[in-house]
Amino acid sequence: MRRTVNLEVNGHPVTLSVEPRRTLLDVVREELGLTGTHAGCEQGACGACTVLIDGAVARSCLVLAVQVDGHRVDTIESVGTPESLHPVQAALRRHHGLQCGFCTPGVVLAAIDLLERCPHPDEAEVREAMSGNLCRCTGYAGLVAAVVAAGAEQQ
Amino acid sequence: MPAATLAEAVSVLAGDPDAKIIAGGQSLMPLLALRLARPTVLVDITGLGYDHLSSPGPGAPAALEIGALVRHTRVEHDPMVRRHAPLLADAARQVGYPAIRNRGTLGGSLAHADPVAELPVAVVALEGAVVAEGPGGSRVIPAVELADGFLSTTLDPAEVLVAVRVRPAGPRHGAAFCEWAPRQHDFGEAGIAIALELDERGGVAWLGAAGFGLDSFPVPLADVLTVAGVRDAERPAASLLRAVAAAVEAAGRGFDDDRGELAGLLAARALRLAWERAEHTGRGDQGCGGAAA
Amino acid sequence: MTTTEWPPKIGAPDPADVVPGPGRPRSVGQRLERKEDPRLLTGTAHYLDDHDVEGLCHVAIARSPLAHARILGVDTAAARALPGVIAVVTQADLEAAGAQRFDHLLYLPGVQPLTWGVLADDRVRFVGEPMVAVVATDRAVAEDAVELLDIDYEELPAVIGTDSALRHDAPLLYPHWGTNEFLHLEAEPPGLGPVLAGAPHRLQERFESHRIIGLPLEGHGAQATWDPAQGRLELVTPSQQPHQLRTVVAEVCGLAETKVRVISPDIGGGFGNKQHFTREECLVGLLARITGRPVRWSQDRTESLTASVHSRPQVHHVDVGYDDGGRVLAMRVDVISDLGNPVLYFSGVGPSLVTVGSLSGGYDIPLLGWTLSAVATNTCPVGAYRGFGGPQAHLTTERVMDLIAADLGLDPVEVRRRNLIPLEIRPYFSSGGLRVDTGDLDAQLLQAVDEFDYRGWRARQAQARREGRFVGIGISSLMQGTAPNQHSAAGRFASLEMATVSVFPDGEVRVQVGTKSQGQGHETVFAQVAATALGVDPQRVSVSDGDTDALMYGQGTFGSRSAVMGGGAVTCAAEKLRERMVSIAAHLGRHLDQPGVFEEVAATAWWHPHRLPPGAELGLTASVVYTPGFTEPTPDELGRANHDETCGSHMTMVAVEVDPATGRVQILAAVMVSDCGVVINPMVVEGQHQGAFAQGLGNVLFEELTYSPEGQPLATTLLDYTIPSALDVPRLRVVHRETPSETAGGFRGMGEAGITATPAALVGAVDDALRPLGVRLRSTRLRARHLRAEVRAAGYRPDAAAWAALA
């Protein structure tokens, strides 16, 4: 039995008809075709599914789509473009903070969220804030350096 | 289904034994994804408005009351919580990751009763209670009587937990939540919450304590620490810390001796930190250094 | 086939240059930002799950809940009746549709016969073994249908662990074997026994590496579409070896290889976990044909943890004889390797062969003998994970050096120096037949001593001990073969690589290479290689891989081979084109490196070939199938063969502090001096080392897969199997050292170095730290709970007051 959900996605109003058991992750990827948000574990442990709900980081695999009725969702697709990267994305590239890229959209959003709450974090603060985004490829050194650098470069 | 009113929520829950409440979803959703929980209907109570923070004051109940739907992030950062229940803020800070804390709710954590969750332990340590609304009306359950086993509480299936009350901090109050986990944000293997207030002589006038890792639910430890001599001491001397560690370890014996020993060490550290904060600031609200030591 | 002369002509002027040209851009060696990053950073990459097609259906697989059982009956009626279900398929259905069986194809002496179907026949031998496949319009419906299957089992006794599997009365996985031992090999050089017996000193130890999993963040999966008009199957799957997968899928599906296309898209990590050619990949192909619909199987996290590919479980019994100076005289290692249920093509036997082939590591061991017992158990199949058998051998080798040092009161660096392969002999052949072509290992080790400030750390350790703190230093002196020949593990497949380099009429360059990037930055590094060989800006070079229709052959990415083999093939192809272009330019009265000439030559070759020199080849495209030619697939009568095209060497040192009360290990410093030959992109190399370091660290400090005695996997989520987070992995400082190899381009390969070095270094460091407590570590288990048990078994009790005062 489907329910209607009205929400704002990446700045645009969207109306969807979804089954209550579908997660926000499923709906973002399938109904909305926004495949930048990834399913890494579907249990909330890895952070690859990170989106922003009303501007705050959340794990879309742990949110039912029907629970964001009336809310704002932002995904990686709202951050930069291949031709024009957001400063956090550019910093990750410069410092080799990604390899296979699967965790990267979640990392970008978590980093942007951190830098909004804490504009010039030191390495320890970055590691703490990013500890919820698991990466199997990089070993984190470049990732952390990138976020520290992005913070330092921020006004 | 989103519940528009409390009465509606209770009615659905009472009518279907397989209905479950969903609030923040951070504990329930993983169970659904693994098909370990199979509710017929999820009653979404996030629209019911239980997100208040009531400060204690003259004429008001002598408790800090926090709505069940308050998210962990708010418990962690809200100045009122930090002032009146710094132990709760410290515990909230150590729950999962920021993304989890943005969604998870205080009431949800207590109702879910994960044996290694931080907030239920802090609430027990603060001599807290929960307010539940159900088919039979409203009732207050002491926190120490809430969890009774692995993911199990004494709540009736049709009851909705709507508020949490804790003892507010008095003068010369210090608190510390110390847990240990293999990776810093893993579920802890053991965790201890201690809050205390010093009298003019520097001795302990009031003590609240509880821990996880000692049983499948939060274990109150104020009496254990009192027997170990905390109320009679003038300072957290080495001998007292050792006695406390041994007593806490003994309290967990038979459940998991390895965790029990960790709990003892953590109790010594939490006591030392809480005492220090009570002495120096009167209101300790810093973390424990978490599990990193 | 191309070989280069020694020393390789890197950076030397082109003999074909008639007039010395202006400076040629050389991007090899530069820290170029990666070309693949913009799409990965913005969520516009295309992993398997992003390939939506019209009418796509989903596959869910019913997997065995028991470790060992006979399947008595399968009732599919309820599942079939569920709305949205398109097909419910058993092994019998697949065979009726023409599915062929897998065969391990191993030709090693004495190996047991073993074939297996895409789905289980009437017997299951591990929890998670695939039994029945459901195709439905929706993934949730498919999973619901799986739950409606009614399957009857007769439970059989299970064997978990090699000890129980090898008992004479053990239940047998394959009764017709008469044993659970799948393979037994031995190599004993003459004289080993007497030398061991007569050695001035002798040590006998048992070392264990525990079971873990590669766990790429993207789960595995496969999507297939059958085109009846062409009789062609198209498979999209994140495979590390798309061309070899094509072979296997074609065989199992009964198709010619020209009728199968494999597209390996952006991959969210491989690490060996996506290297095998699995039942599920073939299943999806068969289902697409049977149903006539496009189908996708997407592995969920629990499936990946319990029913994909595990790795590492081995026990080594070591017997070493050495002299008063710490020089090893003879060594024998008995390796017992747990294969799980070996229904995995090239299985866990592959890593086991690498283990026994790398037991001497970078050391000159005069007499080395070994036995290998590869044993089947009722657990998930064991197979590839970065390192591929090397880490287990390296742990043993390094522990031996440390134990010798401890026994004789010598410095462990000194003991290693006395045993390292000397520089004078090149190529040096190890007792296993490995052809060693590295630079000066002793000098490299000394460089690490310097860079790490080894003396300083020993002093800090002494001070810490006086303060009652537990600081330790660990050393890994690693020499490892790279670019392996898969033949002996797979029964076929060679050490070769293909690349096509083309210069387009406008002067843009396209490289197609048969390796397959899973995050290692191939789009960038091969652009740098081709650009350097051609003398152009790497920004004008595009690189593609993964499509078996675009490049008809390749050998994939594994075994630290891509730079050596892919880089070698690209180098050869690009150099051929360079030579031709220089000659065309000269014919036109120009020099190739002058502005605009490259484009002019390109246009001439394609558009105005009448202006080419007489006899010149038209166009500008070169395809090369490259091999350095140093490997031998088949061992000689003493079990020796050179399986690797070249070698890398890496000297790693770590310092740790251990809190015995909690068992927490804190890494204080980590340095690696890395020689991987010519470094194409130092940033990429450092990233590979850092990532491998994190995996090696995770291996020992945080990760383990265990089973209940009944064979139930106990790690089923990422909350049970905990990989390191950003709080857990410090920076590994990498110091580059370049000794060019003899292969085209001079590359050596290094992707597996960090994961091989780190467990050995950390076990050594923690053992060193806890030495004052009388603790001796003999396995890869350094998780806090294990260390707490170890120190308490040695009599240690924490002082709560002292502990409470820390930090």
Image (cartoon, rainbow, N blue to C red):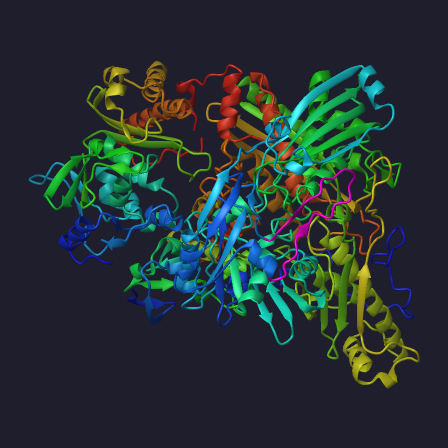
Vertical arrangement, residue C738 with respect to residue C422, above or below: below
The quarter of the rendered structure image containing the N terminus of chain B is bottom left
Tell me if residue A122 can be seen: yes
x, y (%) of residue C385? 63, 44
Give C569 or C256, whichever is nearer the viewer.
Answer: C256
**Farthest residue toward the left?**
B59
x, y (%) of residue B128? 20, 34
Which residue is pictured at 71% across the width and 17% down the height? C407
From the viewer's perspective, tell me whether residue C439 is left or right of residue C260.
right
Which residue is pictured at 46% across the width and 54% down the height? A48
- Total numbered badges shown on the rendered structure: 0
The magenta stretch spans which residues? C97-118
The quarter of the rendered structure image containing the C terminus of chain B is top left
Quarter holding residue B279: top left
Q: Magenta region, mostly helix, strand or loop?
A: loop
x, y (%) of residue C170? 60, 29
x, y (%) of residue A113? 40, 55
From the viewer's perspective, tell me whether residue B231 is left or right of residue C379.
left
